[in-house]
């Protein structure tokens, strides 16, 4: 693989020269899913030039953002930061971090427009920094509620450093909520030397199981898959180079909780959702295996219990049981490729309270 500094320089130059999403050579950095109504409403308030310079592969806006402090890693032109700022409200705070001056210039040019939105959004600071060092550069240490990132971490030559910095910045109970590109197997060295494929989010894609293990290594126990979709590339020349490898756009949430166990353990617990999280009156979706309907007793493993009870979601659930008795591994805790969109249907969803 090329040196980390040359990869950063190449990626920065690549996104400086792009005119808009039509300039991309693949669909890896395109968002297929339609956003919900409240996100569409917030998007209407975002300056048009910001939208035109947006490149992302997912929807990185978790629930319950009011009053939170958020960092958007690789914010680019600022689209997600501007949307999240409206959801955080006047008591929140958003930091947009990017290494490309041209993208930050676009983001900052819309600040005056954003300040006129009603009701008042949170403040936003756009900061030039590397995502591998942002927590140190911004002096963020255990004081961030949510870190988001949209199809950017794959562009880093040192993904472990990025995850470690996110872990450092987050409060206990905070989360890293991000979308990225993953591969069905490890990307070979010849592709990892291709500068165009780096910019197109292909060369830097992690093998999905390497990502899961890396997340656990830095302290994010029990990574949770929220959603996934196949990436078709739609470029015959690049498809030929990548023959035999399947790529996926996937959104994960990683909680900073010391109490999380390596696997989903069963303690006979359950939760009841109160229906009080804004925009989620009928059901709350924690991840791809946990759509928790209002008023229904929903069995959960110990890790899921803690992800709800020890985070900003605490007051929106009732909790049944404790950790006094252990009943083994939680039923439905899978160990194969987790993506529903994988060919052959591997990693199919479990019903009820099945875990990842």
Image: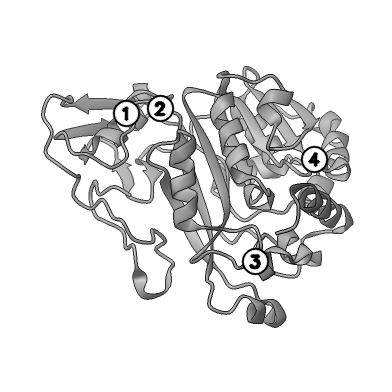
Say which label, 4 or 2, has the lower sequence index.
4
Say which label, 2 or 3, has the lower sequence index.
3
Say which label, 4 or 1, has the lower sequence index.
4
How far apart marks 3 and 1 lie (CA) works out to 40 Å
Identify the element where label 3 is drawn.
Answer: helix
Please give the name of the residue rendered at 58% of the width and 44% of the height, measured from the top-left corner.
60
Say which label, 2 or 1, has the lower sequence index.
2
Identify the element where label 4 is drawn.
Answer: loop
Please give the name of the residue rendered at 13% of the width and 33% of the height, measured from the top-left corner.
326
Residue that numbered label 2 is attached to: 257
For residue 160, side relative to residue 352 (left or right): right
Residue that numbered label 1 is attached to: 306
Q: Residues within 10 Å of mark 3 (few under 14, many from 20)?
A: few
How far apart marks 4 and 2 lie (CA) works out to 29 Å
Please give the name of the residue rendered at 36% of the width and 23% of the height, measured from the top-left corner.
310
Rendered view: 42 above or below 32? above
Residue that numbered label 3 is attached to: 189
How far apart marks 2 and 1 lie (CA) works out to 8 Å
Question: Tell me, what colour scheme is on the image?
Answer: one colour
Q: Who is closer to the viewer here, 241 or 94?
A: 241
Residue 205's spot in the image, x, y percent?
A: 60, 58
How far apart marks 3 and 4 lie (CA) works out to 25 Å
2 or 3: mark nearer the eye:
3
Residue that numbered label 4 is attached to: 99
**Would you say residue 119 is visible in this rendering?**
no
Residue 290's spot in the image, x, y percent?
A: 32, 45
How far apart marks 4 and 1 lie (CA) works out to 35 Å
Q: Quadrant of the N terminus?
A: bottom right
Identify the element where label 1 is drawn.
Answer: helix
Identify the element where label 2 is drawn.
Answer: loop
């Amino acid at each position: 693989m090329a040196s980390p500094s040359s990869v950063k320089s190449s990626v920065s130059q690549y996104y400086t020269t792009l005119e808009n999403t039509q300039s991309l050579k693949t669909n890896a950095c395109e968002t297929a899913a339609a956003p919900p109504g409240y996100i569409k409403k917030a998007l209407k308030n975002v300056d048009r030039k910001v939208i035109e310079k947006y490149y992302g592969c997912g929807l990185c806006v978790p629930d319950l953002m009011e009053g939170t402090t958020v960092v958007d890693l690789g914010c680019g032109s600022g689209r997600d930061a501007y949307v999240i700022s409206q959801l955080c409200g006047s008591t929140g705070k958003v930091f947009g971090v990017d290494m490309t001056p041209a993208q930050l210039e676009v983001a900052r040019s819309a600040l005056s427009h954003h300040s006129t939105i009603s009701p008042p959004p949170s403040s936003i600071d756009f900061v030039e920094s590397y995502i591998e060092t942002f927590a140190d550069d911004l002096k963020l240490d255990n004081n961030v509620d949510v870190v988001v990132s949209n199809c950017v971490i794959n562009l880093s030559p040192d993904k472990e450093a990025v995850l470690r910095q996110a872990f450092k910045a987050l409060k206990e109970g905070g989360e890293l909520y991000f979308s990225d590109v993953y591969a069905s197997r490890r990307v070979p060295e010849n592709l990892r030397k291709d500068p165009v494929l780096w910019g197109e989010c292909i060369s830097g894609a992690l093998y999905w199981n390497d990502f899961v293990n890396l997340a656990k290594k830095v302290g994010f126990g029990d990574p949770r898959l929220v959603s996934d979709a196949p990436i078709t590339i739609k470029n015959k020349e690049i498809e030929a180079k990548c023959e035999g490898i399947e790529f996926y756009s996937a959104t994960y949430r990683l909680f900073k909780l010391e109490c999380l166990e390596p696997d989903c353990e069963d303690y006979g617990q359950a939760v009841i959702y109160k229906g009080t999280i804004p925009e989620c009156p009928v059901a709350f979706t924690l991840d791809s295996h946990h759509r928790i309907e209002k008023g229904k007793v929903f069995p959960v493993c110990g890790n899921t219990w803690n992800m709800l009870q020890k985070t900003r979601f605490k007051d929106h659930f009732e909790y049944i049981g404790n950790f006094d008795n252990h009943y083994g591994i939680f039923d439905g805790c899978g160990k194969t490729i987790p993506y529903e969109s994988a060919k052959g249907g591997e990693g199919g969803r479990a019903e009820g309270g099945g875990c990842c």
